[in-house]
């Protein structure tokens, strides 16, 4: 009998679901996975009344109701401390770059939506998206230089990697120009067993869940 | 000798600085306060090179470099556990509503900027801002019903109140229509000794730090 449920959206598109899903998998919470079909924009009607905000990801676990990626990560970290670095200074750094992702990089998110099943190389390189990418590369380079990789804070995925995992996906799909270090980090994330599993499950998205706006972007 | 520094912007305008400042005060960190003059838009030239993002608030403490309100709150909570509720379920709830604030309510923020020294009653009630206000009132009502107030999770300010303190300020300045419960909560926050001190210090903003766009909004 599972101890709760994780509500997420179409794995092919729902970059934010990937975060909640990764955190829950890393922490090993015993919850049932419920996948809802995403609508094309904003809150999905199917999710109304299912989650407090009408958005995903959303976690229920032993009486706790948890939403927003960062909050789900913190909840999971209470059950699996290694989701944050053990060193106080590194932990503060990890939480800072994770929080910078939570509300930021809007131009990148608008220009280069997540699609786990398609490549659109070279498109959508708007000035705003490029500025966001430059900041993200600087953040990653600083983390990787201090930790020596392969993940942002060392040998294991932390909440910082979880928050940026959708960005890795965007980079793989849209293929903007990136440094060699960024490519290496993206490869490390993409080949992590959990991410491999996510992409495999995303590849099984039913045909009637596909959305024109993400499959044939203007 | 202080153990670090808190970098913030003009107290009269910098709603996000209020969050970092409140968290640091509640946790009692011994840091020097450095207040920079905010520019009219985005990153301030004076902050370039001073903080990792060119934004405020930014905390340095015993070798840790911490930015983004939520990350500063988590850092402070490691030194003062009462910044989050002690109950696991309430703590997950508090972190969820705090994270919902971190990246959200953009329409409200655009329409009703923070100004600790002015009242603009009845203006800027855009549909998007009103939708954000409705969601915020629902969040607060649910928290206050469970905790019995006066703050979102009971007798003391938590990270959730810290995150929403700038919204309280916006409501006091722009005075949209609000429920009696919202008014009571806003009054509780506004009369908290730390918030009283913030407003007193904001009232001492030098004349040449005033910004036309916030003093005479269109």
Image (cartoon, coloured by chain):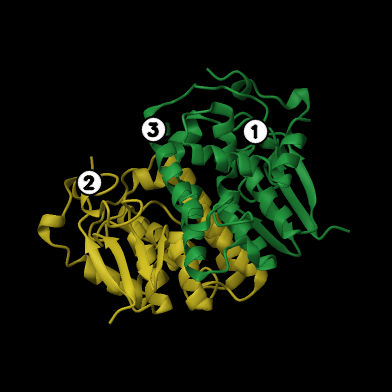
Chain colours: A green, B yellow
The quarter of the displayed image where residue A197 is located:
top right
The N terminus of chain B - image quarter: bottom left
Q: Check residue B40 in the rendering and tell me which mark sits there, or answer none.
A: 2
Q: Position of residue B80 (x, y in %)?
A: 49, 78
Residue to which mark 3 is pinned: A128
Q: Residue sitting at 38 percent across and 47 percent down?
A: B109
The residue lying toward the viewer, choosing from B210 and B79, is B79
Distance from the alpha carbon under mark 1 to that under mark 3: 22 Å
Mark 1 secondary-structure assignment: loop
Of badges 2 and 1, the one in the foreground is: 1
Asked whether the residues under marks 1 and 3 belong to the same chain, the reply is yes
Q: Residue sitting at 72 percent across and 46 percent down?
A: A194
The residue lying toward the viewer, choosing from A102 and B206, is A102
Dot 1 crowding, Cα within 10 Å, few <14, some 14–19, many 20+: many
* Circle 3 chain: A
Q: Residue sitting at 10 percent across and 56 percent down?
A: B208
Asked whether the residues under marks 2 and 1 belong to the same chain, the reply is no
Q: Check residue A13 in the rendering and tell me which mark sits there, or answer none.
A: 1
């Amino acid at each position: 009998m599972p101890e709760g449920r994780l509500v997420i959206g179409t794995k092919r598109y729902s970059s934010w679901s990937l975060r909640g899903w990764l955190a829950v998998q890393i922490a090993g919470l015993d919850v049932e996975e419920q996948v809802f079909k995403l609508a094309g924009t904003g809150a999905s009607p199917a999710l109304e009344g299912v989650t407090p905000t009408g958005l995903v990801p959303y976690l229920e676990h032993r009486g706790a109701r948890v939403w927003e990626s960062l909050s789900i990560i913190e909840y999971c970290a209470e059950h699996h401390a290694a989701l944050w670095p053990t060193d106080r200074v590194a932990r503060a750094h990890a939480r800072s770059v994770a929080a910078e992702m939570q509300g930021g990089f809007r131009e990148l998110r608008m220009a280069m939506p997540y699609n786990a099943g398609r490549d659109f190389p070279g498109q959508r390189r708007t000035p705003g998206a490029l500025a966001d990418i430059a900041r993200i590369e600087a953040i990653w380079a600083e983390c990787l230089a201090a930790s020596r990789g392969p993940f942002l804070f060392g040998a294991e995925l932390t909440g910082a990697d979880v928050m940026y995992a959708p960005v890795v996906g965007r980079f793989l799909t849209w293929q903007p120009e990136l440094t060699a270090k960024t490519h290496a980090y993206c490869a490390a994330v993409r080949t992590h067993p959990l991410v491999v599993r996510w992409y495999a499950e995303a590849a099984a998205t039913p045909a009637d869940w596909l959305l024109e706006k993400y499959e044939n972007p203007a």
